[in-house]
Amino acid sequence: MSEKFKLLSEENFEEGVSSGLTLVDFYADWCGPCRMLTPVLEEVADDVSGKAVIAKIDIDKAQKTASSFQVTSIPTLVLFKDGKEVGRLVGLRDRDTIKEFILGGGTK
C-alpha cells in the first residue's frame, strides 16, 4: 500500500474521517477497476496534499463499515468533512474529476 494513503479498518474508521477533508476509497484487492484507480489516487494525493487526506478501506475486511455506508458497488469514493459524508463518486474516475470533487467539497 502506498505511503500516500491512510489505511482504514473497522476499528479506526470513525477516527480516520473525524477531522478535515478525507476521501475514502472503498475497494477490494480482487477488483480490477479498484486496482486501476490506485495510481490515479496517488496523483490526486499529491494534488490535494495539505488540503485533504486520501484513505482506503478494504470492503472484504470491513464489511460492517461498507454496509453502514451502503457501498454496493466498487470502487466507491466517499468524501467526509469532519466525520460527515458530503459526497460520493461510484466507479472509475479520472484525476481531474476526483481532484475537483475533493476541492469542491463533494460537489460534482
Image: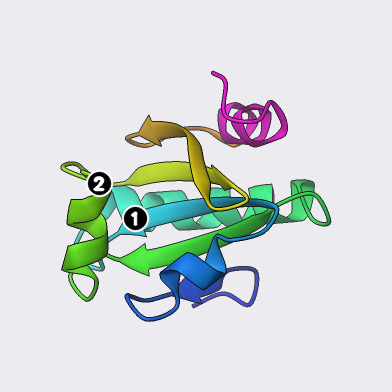
Residue in view at x 44 percent, y 43 percent = 78
Q: Residue lying at the far top in this picture: please name it.
A: 108
On the rendered structure, is 63 left or right of 52?
A: left
Residue in view at x 26 percent, y 62 percent = 65
Residue in view at x 54 percent, y 69 percent = 16
Quarter assignment of residue 31: bottom left
| Disc 2 element | loop
82 or 54, nearer to the observer: 82
> Sequence order check: which comes first, mark 2 or mark 1?
1
The residue beneath circle 2 is 74
- Is 52 placed above or below 85 here? below
On the rendered structure, is 36 left or right of 40?
A: left
Residue in view at x 24 percent, y 56 percent = 66
Question: Where in the figure is residue 17, as x and y percent of width and height?
Answer: 55, 60
On the rendered structure, is 84 left or right of 59?
A: right
Magenta segment's dominant SS is helix
Quarter assignment of residue 71: top left
The residue beneath circle 1 is 26
Question: Where in the figure is residue 22, as x and y percent of width and height?
Answer: 60, 53
Report the quarter where the C terminus lies.
top right
Q: Tell me which segment is drawn in magenta.
A: 96-108
